Image: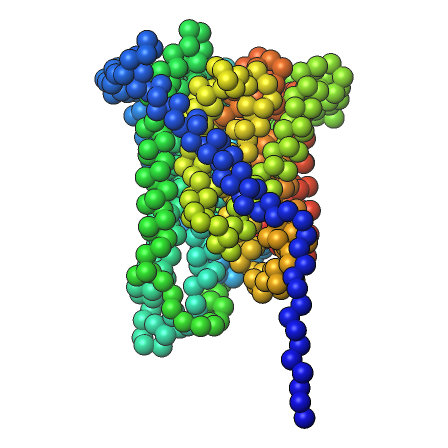
């Protein structure tokens, strides 16, 4: 029997292949987003303001007490916050992940609530609670003890108060890393130690702690980094107390008369230290000596707490009262009270603050409009760019794909305040004069959002086998057509989640926006900061509660997407 050979079918072509132009266009966009502002930052840092090159700016930075004091203060705050976060979050992570703690899922959810609360909003809530004269907690203390009006229990306008507030909204980073590490630790390792005669504390010291130590150290570095680069909390609490951190000092250099050269020089130490810390975190998490080698393994065995179960649960709830319950209660109290620092009762409850924000505060409608426009545009553009770059790096589609991956993750090493300085220096002169428009804020927000969007979508690409795309390519489709018609539908849930989280991130962003906004380009976060400057805490509470409702609605909606549970924000 003769079998006739089947002639190969000609491949069908679908028009002009624009794959490479599009991919190289995305690369050019990345260069503009990242390289251009950083180039101007270095240029100004070395400039004498007259076109010459000088190191005077750096000399002044490291010799002038007005700069040295913020440097030392930032180091003290960051170190203290990192230590406090480790001391609080590591035991909580162990209780949630490795013991029979009641309602462990509720504890995780409450930690997520503190995770997604904007730190500047938390700082304002603690103003309402712990201002020395008008704070609700101090008022309650004086009412209970009969102390004089000038006596206070807490003073949030102090170095200790700032460290406390920053720690409240930084410890979730350490908690998440430690808890996730403990979740992944095989129970068989601890069982083996017990079988060989190791006691519970010996096993913890020789097995569990070494396995979780990289995550704890990485969490400490992340906490240090977050505390070092925050602007909102220091601006709200440190400036009234009469001291600066590096972020507030950089911001002050743009007040009249502006000193852009000094601002650029002051930004570089933050940038360099951020790169160093992120590199150290990567090296710690990548240490092979702490890797778990093997195939499938069982879930870790939960340690019974016996009579201490509810005491441990109470301690966790007491800790979470500081970043969640007390601040949220303060915001609700301020929103419906005639005076933010007056205790809310049935008799004095009012809707005036809500009416004021909706119908009388004209800046609120403009800020909301700008935020919605920027949020939608940033989420759409950022998601598209992240999809393309994640595809290129996952499939190694073009030469130089590693460079694209590096550029996509590079903004994670640029603190928001530093990026704001770089963009201000880049776009306040021809040929691209964008300062005073929403375009400069859009560039800043896309740059800030890109690393987390890229990493999330790159992980999603790894779950899709390339053979699906290869089949489309064999039939003549271009890479772009395969990406649009084959890959994109399979990535639908990840793309939707990425879009939503970028949108929420725009609402929370303050560090870069505070450098780049004008009266016509205010966003919600800047409006809240301005209202705090004028002391309108009731309006802030209304706007802040609205932000939290939107944020939690998005988190809840995304976690309801099938196959996309347990989503968490990244900073």
Q: Position of residue 555 (x, y in %)?
A: 64, 44
Q: Is residue 227 left or right of residue 313?
A: left
Q: Position of residue 430 (x, y in %)?
A: 49, 15
Q: Is residue 131 above or below residue 455?
A: above
Q: Residue 354 or 138: which is nearer the viewer?
A: 354
Furthest residue toward top: 257
Residue at image x 35%, y 15%? 261
Instruction: Examine the rendering and report whether any part of residue 505 can be seen.
Output: yes
What coloring was used for the rendering?
A: rainbow
Q: Is residue 172 left or right of residue 22?
A: left
Furthest residue toward bottom: 1
Q: Residue 41 or 274: which is nearer the viewer?
A: 41
Instruction: Examine the rendering and report whether any part of residue 171 can be seen.
Output: no
Q: Position of residue 2 (x, y in %)?
A: 67, 89
Residue at image x 42%, y 10%? 258
Q: Position of residue 565 (x, y in %)?
A: 62, 54
Q: Quadrant of the N terminus?
A: bottom right
Q: Is residue 537 above or below residue 111?
A: above
Q: Is residue 97 above or below residue 359?
A: below
Q: Residue 172 or 375: which is nearer the viewer?
A: 375
Q: Is residue 512 above or below residue 3?
A: above
Residue at image x 60%, y 45%? 18
Residue at image x 34%, y 40%? 277
């Amino acid at each position: 029997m003769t079998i006739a050979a089947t002639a190969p079918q000609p491949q069908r072509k679908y028009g002009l292949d624009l794959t490479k132009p599009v991919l190289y266009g995305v690369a050019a966009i990345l260069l503009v987003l990242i390289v251009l502002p950083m180039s101007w930052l270095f240029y100004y840092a070395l400039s004498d303001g007259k076109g010459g090159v000088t190191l005077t700016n750096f000399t002044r930075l490291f010799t002038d007490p007005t700069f040295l004091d913020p440097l030392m203060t930032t180091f003290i705050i960051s170190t203290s916050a990192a230590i406090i976060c480790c001391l609080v979050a590591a035991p909580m992570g162990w209780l949630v992940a490795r013991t029979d703690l009641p309602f462990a899922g509720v504890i995780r959810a409450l930690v997520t609530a503190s995770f997604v609360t904007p730190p500047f909003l938390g700082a304002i809530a603690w103003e309402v609670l712990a201002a020395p004269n008008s704070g609700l907690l101090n008022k309650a203390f004086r009412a209970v003890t009969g102390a004089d009006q000038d006596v206070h229990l807490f003073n949030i306008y102090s170095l200790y108060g700032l460290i406390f507030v920053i720690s409240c909204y930084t410890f979730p980073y350490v908690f998440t890393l430690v808890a996730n590490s403990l979740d992944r630790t095989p129970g068989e390792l601890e069982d083996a130690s017990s079988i060989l005669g190791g006691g519970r504390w010996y096993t913890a010291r020789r097995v569990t702690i070494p396995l979780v130590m990289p995550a704890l150290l990485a969490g400490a570095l992340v906490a240090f980094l977050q505390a070092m680069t925050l602007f909102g909390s220091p601006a709200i609490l440190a400036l009234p107390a009469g001291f600066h951190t590096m972020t507030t000092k950089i911001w002050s250099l743009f007040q009249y008369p502006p000193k852009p050269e000094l601002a650029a020089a002051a930004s570089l130490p933050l940038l360099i230290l951020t790169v160093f810390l992120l590199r150290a975190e990567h090296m710690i998490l990548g240490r092979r000596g702490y890797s778990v080698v093997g195939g499938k393994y069982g879930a870790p065995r939960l340690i019974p707490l016996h009579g201490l179960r509810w005491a441990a649960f109470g301690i966790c709830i007491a800790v979470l009262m500081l970043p969640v319950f007390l601040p949220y209660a303060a915001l609700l109290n301020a929103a419906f009270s005639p005076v933010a620092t007056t205790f809310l009762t049935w008799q004095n409850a009012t809707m005036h603050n809500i009416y004021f924000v909706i119908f009388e505060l004209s800046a609120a409608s403009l800020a909301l409009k700008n935020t919605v426009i920027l949020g939608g545009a940033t989420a759409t553009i950022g998601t598209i760019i992240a999809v393309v770059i994640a595809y290129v790096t996952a499939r190694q589609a073009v030469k130089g794909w590693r460079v694209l991956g590096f550029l996509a993750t590079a903004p994670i090493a640029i603190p928001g305040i530093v990026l704001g300085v770089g963009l201000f220096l880049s776009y306040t002169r021809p040929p691209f004069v964008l300062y005073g428009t929403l375009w400069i804020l859009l560039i800043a927000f896309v740059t800030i959002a890109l690393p987390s969007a890229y990493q999330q979508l790159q992980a999603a690409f790894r779950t899709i086998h390339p053979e699906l795309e290869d089949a489309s390519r064999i039939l003549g489709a271009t890479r772009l057509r395969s990406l649009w018609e084959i890959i994109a539908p399979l990535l639908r849930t990840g793309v939707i989640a990425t879009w939503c989280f970028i949108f929420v991130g725009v609402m929370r962003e303050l560090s870069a926006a505070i450098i780049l906004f004008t009266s016509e380009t205010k966003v919600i976060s800047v409006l809240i900061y301005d209202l705090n400057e004028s002391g309108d805490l009731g309006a802030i509470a209304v706007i802040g509660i609205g932000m939290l409702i939107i944020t939690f609605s998005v988190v809840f909606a995304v976690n309801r997407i099938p196959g996309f549970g347990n989503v968490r924000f990244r900073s």
